[in-house]
Amino acid sequence: MPPQPILILVMGPSGVGKSTVGRMLADRLGAEFVDADDHCPTENRDKMSRGIALTDEDRVGWHRLLNTVSRELLSRDCNVVLACPAHREIHRKTILSGVAQHRTVYLHGDLDLIRNRVAARKDHFFPPSLVAHQFSIMEPPSDALWLDVARSPDELVAEAMDKLCL
């Protein structure tokens, strides 16, 4: 691990396994895990559960909160793994603002695979009808480790550890 605390952003559309891979990666690193869903405003959850896509305006306060939570943990010398969709570059800039050390892991996969995963989830606010929208607004990061989620979470975490030199 770097001498300075690091934030690892695990990003991608709903259903790619951000929470699963993020938790596993945090466990392997002895890092704090932050799931963006746990900090999602009630209004945003309600909107998505009705099949209405969020706008950038809906997301900005949420992303600022995630930045605050992450920076607080980093200030206590904790490494952080944050699982968050972070679809667009502007989202990532807000989330990573003021964070000196960070890396990004972009989980991606086939639209049908991801839609089927979302449809199979129980008791989650995000409906399968919004998956295509998330794919349409995704601005894939050029400066990230890209991992195809057709592989197992164990394989993804092992590759992330290896490629990020963690």
Image: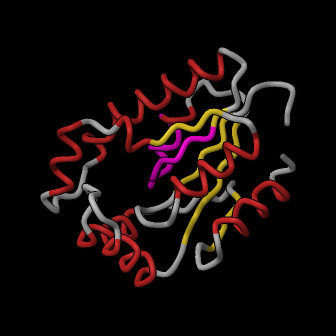
* Image coords of residue 7 (percent x, y): 66, 36
- The residue depicted at 30 percent of the width and 45 percent of the height is 56
Q: Quadrant of residue 59?
A: top left
The residue nearer to you, when weighing 120 against 141, is: 120
The answer to whether residue 86 is magenta is yes
Relative to 57, say whether 146 is above or below.
Answer: below
- The residue depicted at 68 percent of the width and 49 percent of the height is 25
Q: Quadrant of residue 77?
A: top right
- The residue depicted at 53 percent of the width and 76 percent of the height is 109
The residue nearer to you, when weighing 83 against 143, is: 83
- The residue depicted at 48 percent of the width and 48 percent of the height is 84
Scheme by which the image is coloured: secondary structure
Q: How many labels were placed on the picture?
A: 0
The magenta span reads 81-94
Q: Judge left or right: residue 97 versus residue 28.
A: left
Relative to 101, say whether 160 is above or below.
Answer: below
